[in-house]
Amino acid sequence: MKTIAVLTSGGDAPGMNAAIRAVVRTACENGVKVYGVVRGYNGLINGDFIEMDLRSVSDIINRGGTILYSARSTEFATEEGMRKAVRTCREKGIEGVVVIGGDGSFRGARDLSERGIPCVGVPGTIDNDIACCDYTIGYDTCLNTIMDMVDRIRDTSESHDRCAVIEVMGRRAGYLALNAGIACGATSILIPEVEVDIEKHVIERMRKTQRTDKKHFIIIVAEGCGVDVHELAKHIQAETGVESRATVLGHTQRGGYPTVKDRVMATRMGNYAVKLLMNNIGNRVVAAQKEDVVDYDIFEALNMTKTIDMNLYNIAHEVSI
Ligand code: ATP
């Protein structure tokens, strides 16, 4: 392929810029023309393209968010929207597209591939919920951000003998909650993969810990559990007598400068994606498996399932008491 495009889609994630940079630089260094698509699939539909060069991606490796902007495109999910996207790609001579995003974005990439524009997906989402990947771009930064914020909340909870009930992101998955909960020494971690039992998993654990003279507590709740943390804080206070405060970390978890891991992995994955397209290989998803970067057929990748590490969950409950 001699002309490709790159877009970011779905929720932004720190490290997306490092991936864009790697795509653009790898393409330029190998004589491949590369367009940046503005606002995800909307940009493909509307023909919102920027011709990128080596300097278009200067000074972005350290920045969170995405210089190409991101979007959730309802129009693209329609047959007409996809046809328009194919048409604009053909008009620009775009032979392949690197799609940086989550599994929803990969479904879009699959549909575009089926309509004759080969795509390569690069996993960019803080949620780490892509089945074929051990790790996704943005996950490491997000975990570290959560840890930093929970540490701050711990200082004040400890000073006032309070219980902090903290909701973290993750969509339908508990990877962020489980790992951040371990890193922050949470007394309880509620994740969607384990049936929520407030009495057993929160109240009983707190009472047991209170008997060892512990007076402040951290409860981490994954958003995918569907538990209202404000209501949970009231319930905890009524049941245990410990003053309880709820915090929803919200979008603070998405931003910020990416960690070393996210920058390095994003660079490797962006480079890998372009090499696939340069060899006329499309319809693939780039994935991180342990320390390696590999690729999967996009259909196969979307049919895979991923389970939470229950051993890790059990360890968390054994040590945080
Ligand atoms: P994150 O989970 O980090 O937010 P995501 O990529 O999963 O990222 P989604 O909002 O699910 O985010 O998807 C992004 C976009 O991908 C959608 O707005 C839509 O344009 C496209 N998309 C999602 N699902 C499909 C589908 N089944 N077919 C075609 N396009 C889709």
Image (spheres, rainbow, N blue to C red):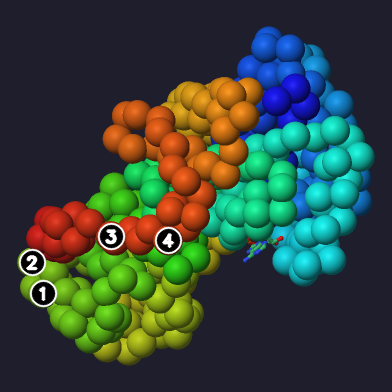
Q: Is residue 11 left or right of residue 224?
A: right
The N terminus - image quarter: top right
Foreground: disc 1 or disc 3: 3
Nearer to us in this view, 288 or 197: 288
Residue displayed at 43% across by 54% down: 300
The C terminus - image quarter: bottom left
SS assignment at label 1: helix
Q: CA distance from mark 4 to mark 2?
A: 47 Å
Is residue 7 shown to the viewer in this render? Answer: yes
- Compared to residue 79, the image places residue 184 above or below, namely above
Q: Which mark is residue 308?
A: 3
Residue displayed at 85% across by 33% down: 93
Q: Are marks 1 and 4 in contact (CB under 8 Å)?
A: no
- The local crowd at label 2, few if under 14, some if 14 to 19, many if 20 or more residues have their Cα within 10 Å, is few
The amino acid sitting under disc 2 is Thr
Give x and y (percent) for residue 23.
65, 26
Q: CA distance from mark 1 to mark 4?
A: 42 Å
Figure quadrant of residue 277: top right
Read off the residue under disc 2. 212
The amino acid sitting under disc 4 is Asn
Figure quadrant of residue 200: bottom left
Q: Are marks 1 and 3 in contact (CB under 8 Å)?
A: no
Read off the residue under disc 1. 208
Foreground: disc 1 or disc 2: 1
SS assignment at label 2: loop
Q: CA distance from mark 1 to mark 2?
A: 7 Å
Q: Are marks 1 and 2 in contact (CB under 8 Å)?
A: yes
The amino acid sitting under disc 1 is Lys
Q: Which mark is residue 303?
A: 4
Nearer to us in this view, 304 or 306: 304
Figure quadrant of residue 210: bottom left
Give x and y (percent) for residue 202.
24, 77
